[in-house]
Image: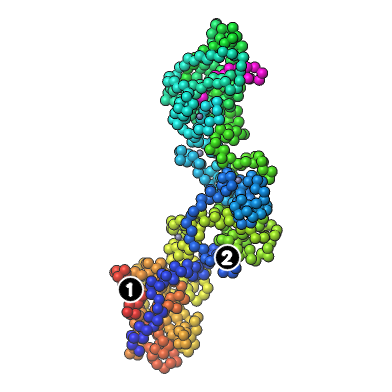
Amino acid sequence: MDLDSIECVSSSDGLDEDEIHLHHTLHPYSLSHHHPELSATKPRNGSNNSGIAVPTATAPATSVHELLECPVCTNSMYPPIHQCHNGHTLCSTCKTRVHNRCPTCRQELGDIRCLALEKVAESLELPCKYYSLGCTEIFPYYSKLKHEALCNYRPYSCPYAGSECSAVGDIPFLVAHLRDDHKVDMHTGCTFNHRYVKSNPREVENATWMLTVFHCFGQYFCLHFEAFQLGMAPVYMAFLRFMGDENDARTYSYSLEVGGYGRKLIWEGTPRSIRDSHRKVRDSHDGLIIQRNMALFFSGGDRKELKLRVTGRIWKEQNPDAGCVSSSDGLDEDEIHLHHTLHPYSQSHHHPELSASKPRYGNNNTAVNGGPTATAPATNVHELLECPVCTNSMYPPIHQCHNGHTLCSTCKTRVHNRCPTCRQELGDIRCLALEKVAESLELPCKYYSLGCTEIFPYYSKLKHEGLCNYRPYSCPYAGSECSAIGDIPLLVAHLRDDHKVDMHTGCTFNHRYVKSNPREVENATWMLTVFHCFGQYFCLHFEAFQLGMAPVYMAFLRFMGDENDARTYSYSLEVGGYGRKLIWEGTPRSIRDSHRKVRDSHDGLIIQRNMALFFSGGDRKELKLRVTGRIWKEQNPEAGVCIPNLCS
Ligand SMILES: [Zn+2]
Ligand SMILES: [Zn+2]
Ligand SMILES: [Zn+2]
Ligand SMILES: [Zn+2]
Ligand SMILES: [Zn+2]
Ligand SMILES: [Zn+2]
Ligand SMILES: [Zn+2]
Ligand SMILES: [Zn+2]
């Protein structure tokens, strides 16, 4: 025997480095049976005749938040959320309006709950919709809407009282809008002196009003004057609103004075924010109220003409915390807060932009009472994608019962048309919403705690995790179905303590393998020794097996670490005796490649039994192989050849 036979053996696997990579790409799950932790989440489409192929990566196209918009009315959906058999969702209000036909596929709607989407909503944490205006708060879905109706960063509504104006925006925008679109008088200064004249003061209508804007202290104030019926009594009222939020409004005070012909009435108060609607301020009587008879005294007493001179002043409070709202209206600060708490939506009809997303429980006879309340995020969206029956990750098609209990397509074929959760008939209902949720998810690699920082769409996460560089290693011990996994230090200790493997230090070795009856060659005949050098650990495998019909012995080295590091080392193995010698040089394979895979690719020193018996002395009674070897670090691993260069 000479080196020609080695050349034959080592080239016979026909698998070069490029092909190994290709193999990984085509069969991302081919290694997963070596990872007990991974196989728990492996999709089982094989046994499911309605299933699709192995899931592939999908770019996150749909935002989960968009899934919660009713596709019919575009309002945000709140429980109960409904769907058709094909999984097209709609809100409970729309469900009552579509005459039992799915608006998307026109098939019969039935009465199917989409519980999965309701749970998704529960688990969501979303930024306030006014984040672009400066709000940085994050809310559970069911309390987000409530916050947004009161968010300090929400745009202001037009303070003009006499119309259903729908303009919203920030203060500079609204000031320009009042001046340009409503032709409102604009005044500069913190004092004012206005005269209101009306020729027929007996006509008091709700619609009689005036608005003037004052600019002082760098702020804008709205002075309202109007006539209305207070109970049965006609009155005039003047009040000031601050163009800004409640907290800033409280830092100002104002006075109004009206009088004439020896009489005088003075009001002092705090301007209300334009967050409080014109009507709300008026109805709370938070301003100067003048009975009509009194107003006619001020006008001269001839009861023919109203001539009111209103003077006033705005000033900045030195200590705004002492007394915010005037005590004369009987409404103190605490009561205002209480009012807000009890009726969070009381102002929402002034916010056209907000009302589009307001839940409509009123005309839906199956809806729960009251508005949505805050729910702590209890369910992780990722957990929703675990089949509640087998706990595997669910992939399309995802199924559910009429009550919304989901299950994977494999389990669906096994449950005899009964929902495992509620025991009712299962039918053939798709949970499209959950499939879309999965599509839109971006999740961290499950090995993030081991150092992986990558984020993946749901449908490609599993594929990555099967190949993640940070995934734990499997035990390299070949002779058992050992399920130990962990990092290299853990596995080294495990090999030493649990498998009683010989541990050697140094980069050279000299081992003798002796076997008394060399005719018995079984797959199960093998040995493992661990070498520690260059700060790394290497596994030297020696075993006997049948190669085709020929019994052979094989020795090879595996590196305890990943593929890239493995390629920076080389090793040689030499076996000989009685005038013959066989030398192998190669690159250790990573223990990512299973013992069996390396063996079956013939990537090591292979000794035919007859040759081995020559080395043993030729009496064919006993196998006595002395294997020596050496491990070294490659100076330039890129230029080197990874697969033995003896192959040529
Ligand atoms: Zn709807
Ligand atoms: Zn449909
Ligand atoms: Zn906000
Ligand atoms: Zn307006
Ligand atoms: Zn299942
Ligand atoms: Zn069920
Ligand atoms: Zn990873
Ligand atoms: Zn083990």
Location of residue 170 with respect to 572 vertically, above or below: above
Location of mark 2 (residue): 51
Span shown in magenta: 229-242
* In this rendering, position of residue 74 left or right of residue 546: right
Quadrant of residue 367 within the rendered picture: top right
Residue 359 drawn at (x, y percent): 60, 41
* In this rendering, position of residue 516 left or right of residue 280: left
Q: Please tell me which residue is depicted at 56% across the width and 40% down the height of the picture.
A: 356
* SS of the residue under disc 2: loop
Quadrant of residue 172 within the rendered picture: top left
The crowding category of the residue bearing disc 1, from other C-alpha atoms within 10 Å (few below 14, some 14 to 19, many at least 20), is some
For the N terminus, the image quarter is bottom left
Tell me whether circle 1 and circle 2 mark residues in contact (CB < 8 Å): no
Q: Magenta includes 489?
A: no
Location of mark 1 (residue): 641
Kind of residue sitting beneath label 1: Val
Residue 303 drawn at (x, y percent): 60, 9
Total marks in image: 2
Label 1, label 2: how far apart the Cα atoms are: 43 Å
